[in-house]
Image: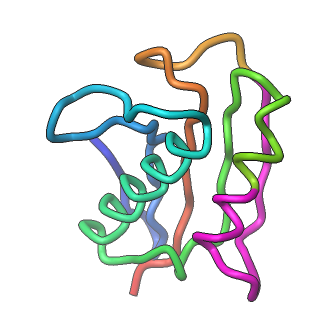
């Protein structure tokens, strides 16, 4: 299950930079993986009746905290300069499919 709705909220499972047409990680650095993970997250949100603008909290998991700045550039680009959601960023030993970044979210449903 990609998301669960409860009490007007949508709790989305973590998304990595998989290209769903190939089932493989997108090519490129953590920027490319972050962009794809956020696109995947947007699709999950949409299916659950929400969008990126409805996100109130995210958790970002990074295999290497040295990737934080690069991930943050894409994150800021996608969420805009307004009022981005609250965020926690955590270093982890490994992620599914060899991903460098994984992002989950909590959103308000429309």
Extent of the magenta region: 73-91
- Colour scheme of the rendered structure: rainbow
* Side (left or right) of 28 relative to 86: left
Task: Locate the C terminus by quadrant.
Answer: bottom left
* Side (left or right) of 34 relative to 49: right
Q: Residue at x 43, y 49 (%)?
A: 36
Whether the magenta-drawn stretch holds residue 95 is answered as: no
Q: Residue at x 45, y 18 (%)?
A: 96
What is the tally of numbered marks visible in this picture?
A: 0
Residue 26 x %, y %: 38, 35
**What residue occupies the far top of the structure in this picture?**
93
Depth order, front residue of 44/77: 77
Which quadrant of the figure has residue 72?
A: bottom right
From what the image shows, is residue 78 above or below residue 83? above
**What residue occupies the far left of the structure in this picture?**
21
From what the image shows, is residue 89 above or below residue 77? above
Q: Residue at x 56, y 36 (%)?
A: 102
Residue 34 x %, y %: 56, 46
Q: Residue at x 15, y 40 (%)?
A: 21
Residue 82 x %, y %: 74, 88
Residue 45 x %, y %: 37, 66
Task: Locate the N terminus by quadrant.
Answer: top left
């Amino acid at each position: 299950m990609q998301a669960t709705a409860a009490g007007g909220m949508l709790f989305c499972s973590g998304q990595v930079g998989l290209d769903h047409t190939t089932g493989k990680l997108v090519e490129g650095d953590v920027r490319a993986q972050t962009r794809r993970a956020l696109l995947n997250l947007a699709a999950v949100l949409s299916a659950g009746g929400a969008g990126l603008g409805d996100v109130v909290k995210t958790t970002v998991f990074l295999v290497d905290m040295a990737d934080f700045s690069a991930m943050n550039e894409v994150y800021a680009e996608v969420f805009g300069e307004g009022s981005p959601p609250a965020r926690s960023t955590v270093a982890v030993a490994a992620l599914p499919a060899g991903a460098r970044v994984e992002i989950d979210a909590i959103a308000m449903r429309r």
